[in-house]
């Protein structure tokens, strides 16, 4: 199996896993607010990642010069991006969460140009415009949209931007195992979110956290979505150019929309499909040609 095929497989699996994540978030946020939910998710994931890394005998050492970048990846990608993603999903729907964050590949084109020197062609500029307009249609399409919908859409857009930035920055940490970088990034986010999350846990009945649907959602988010999804995504990024890898992120809204309709009964509107088509068009434009470096 060639490197590109393996990369495509890893990225497709990761994005499909994250499509299911939005349904689990909708279930969990009915009981647990976004920040404590992310904290519980990472508490589960950091244990699982350590076990996986130990079993695979990875080296946990990171060069001193790279720690600043590791911290930034943890803050931007694992803390800010995921908290805004789950906040936006709470305020909107699993479908909207999955499709707005699918604008990530177009944003990756910009960051790949700025940080990695990949060429920004007119087609790729158009892809960013198309994806942005698509996101606006999804958020503002219905005439009776509520303020929560606007705030949710804005939160999801921030999540897409910060995730794109993190994905590109990971290319600068390609010398480390994806398990190691994911572990340290998650650990940074876990520490940052601990003070608020511990305060919240003191005020919530433990019975509500032990409800089977909530436990299942947290385990999925921690073990499958974070441990499995992040490691697969990071490994795929090491095997493909950043802007090309972003194409596979579009598996996420397909799975998220399907599961949101099947499991949660979420409606699919005309504006949703129009915005989705523009985001999809933007992604395809962005990935039309292999990336080159100057």
Image: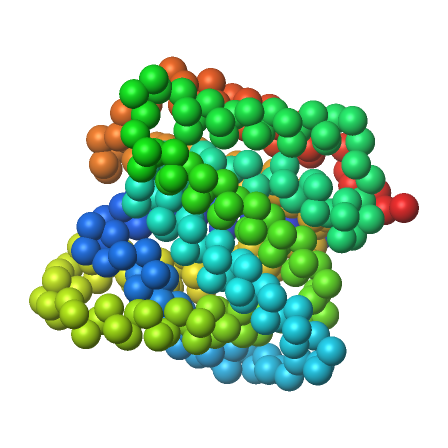
Residue furthest front as drawn: 147
103 left or right of 227 in image: right
Question: At which x and y percent is residue 203?
Answer: 16, 70
> What residue is drawn where x is 15% and y is 59%?
212
Q: Is residue 191 visible?
A: yes
* Colouring rule applied to residues: rainbow
Residue furthest right as drawn: 294
* Residue 208 or residue 217, whichever sits in front: 208
Q: Quadrant of residue 265?
A: top left
Question: At which x and y percent is residue 160?
Answer: 53, 44
Q: How many marks?
A: 0
81 left or right of 120 in image: left
> What residue is drawn where x is 59% and y is 64%?
73
- Quick check: 263 above or below 42? above
* Residue 130 or residue 141, whichever sits in front: 141
219 left or right of 270 in image: left
Question: At which x and y percent is residue 145?
Answer: 32, 25
Q: Is residue 10 visible?
A: no
Question: At which x and y percent is residue 3?
Answer: 70, 52
- Quick check: 286 above or below 85? above
> What residue is drawn where x is 61% and y is 31%?
283
> What residue is drawn where x is 31% and y is 50%?
25
34 left or right of 129 in image: left
């Amino acid at each position: 199996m060639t490197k590109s095929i393996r990369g495509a497989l890893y990225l497709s699996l990761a994005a499909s896993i994250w499509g299911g994540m939005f349904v689990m978030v909708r279930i969990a946020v009915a009981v647990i607010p976004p920040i404590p939910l992310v904290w519980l998710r990472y508490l589960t994931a950091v244990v699982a990642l350590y076990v996986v890394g130990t079993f695979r005998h990875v080296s946990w050492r990171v060069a001193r010069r790279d720690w600043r970048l590791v911290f930034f990846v943890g803050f931007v990608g694992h803390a800010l991006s995921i908290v805004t993603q789950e906040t936006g999903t709470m305020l909107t729907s699993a479908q909207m969460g999955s499709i707005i964050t699918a604008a990530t590949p177009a944003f990756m084109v910009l960051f790949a140009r700025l940080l990695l020197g990949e060429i920004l062609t007119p087609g790729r500029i158009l892809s960013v415009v198309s994806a942005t307009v698509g996101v606006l249609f999804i958020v503002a399409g219905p005439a009776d949209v509520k303020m929560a919908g606007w705030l949710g859409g804005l939160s999801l857009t921030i999540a897409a931007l910060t995730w794109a930035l993190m994905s590109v920055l990971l290319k600068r940490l390609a010398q480390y195992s994806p398990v190691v970088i994911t572990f340290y990034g998650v650990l940074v986010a876990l520490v940052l979110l601990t003070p608020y999350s511990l305060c919240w846990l003191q005020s919530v009945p433990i019975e509500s956290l032990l409800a089977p649907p909530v436990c299942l959602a947290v385990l999925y988010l921690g073990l499958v979505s974070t441990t499995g999804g992040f490691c697969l995504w990071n490994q795929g990024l090491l095997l493909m150019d950043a802007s090309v890898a972003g194409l596979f992120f579009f598996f996420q809204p397909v799975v998220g929309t399907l599961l949101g309709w099947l499991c949660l009964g979420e409606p699919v509107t005309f504006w949703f499909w129009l915005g989705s088509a523009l985001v999809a068009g933007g992604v395809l434009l962005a990935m039309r040609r292999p990336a080159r470096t100057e």
